[in-house]
Image (tube, helix red, strand yellow):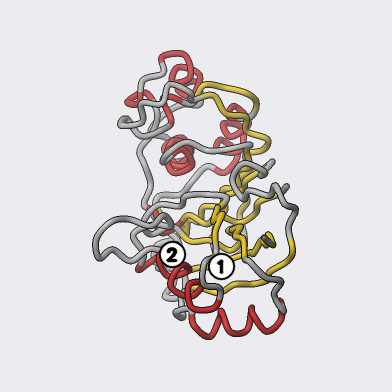
Amino acid sequence: MYNFSAVVEYDGTDFKGFQQQPGNVRTVQGELFKALGILAPGFSRFSYAGRTDAGVHARHQVIGFGCREALNIYRFSWKLNCLLPDDITVKNISRAAEDFDARKSAKMRQYSYYVVNNSCQSVFLKKYSILITRKLDICAMREAADMFTGVKDFTAFCNDNLKSGHNIREIYSCAVKRFSGELIEFKISANAFLYNMVRIMVGTLLEIGEGKRDAGSIKKAFKSKIRKDAGRIVPAKGLFLTKVTY
């Protein structure tokens, strides 16, 4: 068995998430399985770095898979991209170690969330960002973002339906950057993320930037572990998986 890893990029707009689901539901994994099944019958050990939700995009999703024979990587990549739909691209494929698992082997995952802070939305960004017309306080959001870093229990910052009981994660960095044209990027890296965690963190920071809550509410949410003490969940369309390291 030969192991391979691949970097995959996709526009999540028309997908019901990455993970394959029962029934006639369009997912990124489902489309990858169709194409791999044609080119590499009997492929196995399929794994992925992050289970992105419906509407979430990726510039750097990593998958792993095994084949019974060695591949001509250049030809295989070209054929695979010919079979995949227009909203998925395999950016590169490489040989991987025998024990490689795209999820378990990952050391860091990074997500970016995009907000247009202007009186109107850009035609070219509306599928991939949200619009906030109220002027945002960038300095306040940057100061508050620092409060997320470190090893913490993120129970208040994940979906209420998550009952795993293992909600401790380490945030390596949480940065807020403003670009020209009033585009704001929230960039967050961690060892792993909980369900809806990034979108709730961003929603909390936006409420601070809008003056609807103070930074101290973040400490309160960490202490109480109650979902309502954190901010709103922002729409999926502004979220991108941007980096995975091993």
Labelled disc at residue 61: none
Q: Which amino acid does label 2 sit on?
A: Val
The reply to whether residue 153 is visible in this rendering is yes
Residue 77, by quadrant, is bottom right
Q: Is residue 87 above or below residue 15?
A: below
Task: Name the side, left or right, on which 116 lies relative to 234.
Answer: right
Q: Quadrant of the N terminus?
A: bottom right
Task: Name the side, left or right, on which 132 lies relative to 4.
Answer: left
Q: CA gap, disc 2 to disc 1? A: 10 Å
Give how far across and how far down residue 145 sits, in percent.
58, 34
Q: Which residue: 49% across, 82% down?
A: 83
Give how far across and how far down residue 166 sits, in percent.
48, 23
Give the mark count: 2
The reply to whether residue 130 is visible in this rendering is no
Are dots 2 and 1 in contact, CB under 8 Å?
A: no
Q: Which of 11 and 65 is in front in this view?
A: 65
Q: Which residue: 66% across, 51% down?
A: 244
Q: Which of 127 and 122 is in front in this view?
A: 127
* SS type, badge 1: strand
The label nearer to you, 2 versus 1, is 2
The disc, 2 or 1, on the residue closer to the chain's N-terminal end is 1
Task: Name the side, left or right, on which 24 lies relative to 163.
Answer: left
Give how far across and how far down residue 231 sits, in percent.
38, 33
Q: Which residue: 55% across, 65% down?
A: 43
Q: Is residue 140 above or below residue 181?
A: above
Labelled disc at residue 28: 2
Give how far across and how far down residue 147 sits, in percent.
59, 27
Residue, disc 1: 9
Q: Which amino acid does label 1 sit on?
A: Glu
Instruction: Mark 2: give few (<14), some (14-19) or many (20+) Cα within 10 Å.
Output: many
